[in-house]
Image: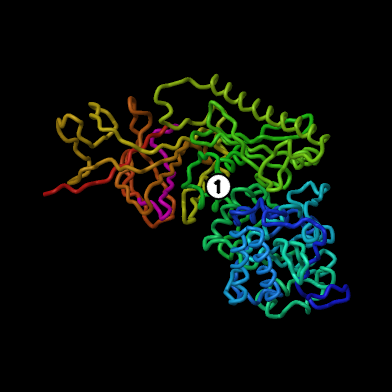
Amino acid sequence: MPKTSTDSNKPEWIFGDLGGGMADGPNAGPTVEFRGNPSYYIAREALQNIMDAHDSSSGKPVEAEFSVVTMPAKSVPGAERLAKILSACAVYLREKGAIDTAVEFEKGASKISKNTTVKVLRISDFNTVGMTKENWFRFAESVGFSNKQSGSGGSFGLGKGAYYVSSGFLSLFISSIDEANSYTFAGKTIVTTFEEDGKRKQNNGTYGVGDQKPIHDRDLIPTNFTKLFPSVFKRIRPGTDFLIPDFIGEDDWASELVQSILRYFWLPIITGKLTVKVQENETINQNTVEHLLHKYFSKAPFEWGNTDVPNPLPLYYAYRKDAPIEDELDHLGKVRLHLLLADGYPNRVALIRKPGMVVDCIKKNSMNRYAAVFICDNENGNALLREMENQEHNEWKWENAKTQENREKAKLAYLEMENFIKRELQKLSTSREERYLSIEGLEDFIAMDTDEGSGAQGGEKEYTQKEYGDEVTVEEMRNLDLKVKKKILSIKERAEKEGGDVYIPVADKRNKGKKKSKTKNNDARPLAGIAFLSFAGSDSESNPTHQIQIKGEPGKKIDIVQIVAGGDDSSERLVLQTIIADKTVKNQPSFNANEIRDLVLNKMGARRLKVKFSESGKYSLKLNAFELIKKSR
């Protein structure tokens, strides 16, 4: 039996007696809502808590690090005792008929008894105040408490359940130095009620000393554990390390985690409030976030349905593109809405309050495709929205407010937020209807910038040499006032117009003869599966330029890319003056008249071009792609 006297200095797993209290089964406690996707919930909950603990006096952004190491299961502090507890939980569950859950507890106990090698997820933070007494109480010693005065995100409340369910042992270890340089260490577990020596035990326990107290002397921590994590136990800077044993993440956990961080934390990252390193492979900060967004999401559809894995690029573009629409609402105070129209966009509004995490993306119908970002980060508005937030931090509902008084306030605040968003979308639809004529076939092309076009600030820029080569830079998105159209290239069989400028080297359906290629000893045929994205801008001398992104099969060679202005019924030949291709592959294409020759896509299946035409102007471009087929002799 473990000692429970307050003068005990021997660290061990300690559980209190349940006495006459109610038994806790597998569906009780703070862990239930966080099952199923460890990368999703760990990213959201851990980063919110880390941001809450920011040391503002440091003058630096919050830093978070995620890494996985392996270790023998018996190196877990108090491993043998923990195995007995897991086995006792399994016995209790079987007696109560919860067979499936009992099996999971038995698996955990078996890993320890067999000393199986297990993964350990380490989450570290820097430029934070560490586990202060208040934070320790809310995270390690209580359930359901949160800091209402923080105006922050998780505030170490119910979201901590995400840590426990990420462990096959339902456990974690916390090592922290606070701002007063005080050290704290403890193990925590949330299991089920179990019986020991004829007594029912509480479902939560502590690896500590005395009456479930944390350890303040590092020498009391088992050395076989501390040697596995030298950077954790030799740390001298304030901050906290969480160690989650038997991490249940899949082999691709790092990629999944990076994507989850990019989906929900791009705003605090681009505003310089947060940097994250994942397994030495990816560092996500102000300088890399745009690259990583394109790396992971440029090939995914911009339009998405009801899903927890949306493409964040439309939201990111909406935030970076234009100055926001601002308003002062009666209950929420100052709010802003970033709004961007583009075909194929998801018709979603991201909801963000003070910490900067995307809480939810609500769908609002509109006559135009768009992406929008709603932000309320003033103190009073943030407090009201926090009242509406569920414990998973992924929705706002006024019904979530804790008291009747707050529910009434929250309801009014939520309705005025919805009305504000609806009003701005209606204005946009009306202005678009008044501003543009409906021209048949116009949807096949890209709309050029308006009379207010801002290309004058654009300037000639060096092309990126990053591996993917298909992003639109932040500055370009800001400097271009346009509507982007993405279209899969398709070439219909039709007769070439007499004297026309559009070169379509295919036979018509009546087999009245074969159209000759303009390339010797070869026939050209349309190339399927190619897409393009184009827009117009200006260089430093206000000369019109056009940027073109082409996508298709990685490494694909496109023999001819034909460029014309206009559409199927009326096309104008454009003579190329210069082309600059990105340097993501060694290939540099040539050009002749209105044709780009021998263009090779990079390993991401993309290529980016900047072109100028002999006749200055900004055009709606149409591209046709061909491959050359050698004639048989």
Q: Is residue 61 visible?
A: no
* Residue pointed to by mark 1: 309
Q: Position of residue 327 (x, y in %)?
A: 73, 30
Residue at position x 62%, y 74% in the image: 112
Q: Local crowd at mark 1 within 10 Å, few (<14), some, or many (≥20)?
A: few
Q: Compared to 52, does 413 lie above or below? A: above
Residue at screen point 31% across, 39% down: 593
Decide whether residue 612 is among the magenta residues. Answer: yes
Q: Which quadrant of the rendered structure holds the N terminus? A: bottom right
Q: Is residue 11 above or below residue 105?
A: below
Tell me where residue 369 appears, x and y as whole percent: 53, 31
The total of numbered circles placed on residues is 1
User: Of helix, strand and loop, which one carries label 1?
Assistant: loop
Residue 375 appears in view: yes
Relative horizontal placement of residue 368, taking residue 130 as reference (left or right): left
Residue 350 position by quadrant: top right
> Horizontal and vertical percent for residue 161?
70, 56
Q: Residue at x 82, y 47 (%)?
A: 148
Amino acid on which disc 1 is placed: Val
Instruction: Kindly indicate the quadrant of the structure image that contains residue 574.
Output: top left
Based on the picture, tell me whether residue 325 belongs to the magenta stretch: no
In this view of the protein, which residue sits in the foreground, 426 or 109?
A: 109
User: Which residues are drawn in magenta?
Assistant: 600-619
Q: Nearer the viewer, residue 224 or 616?
A: 224
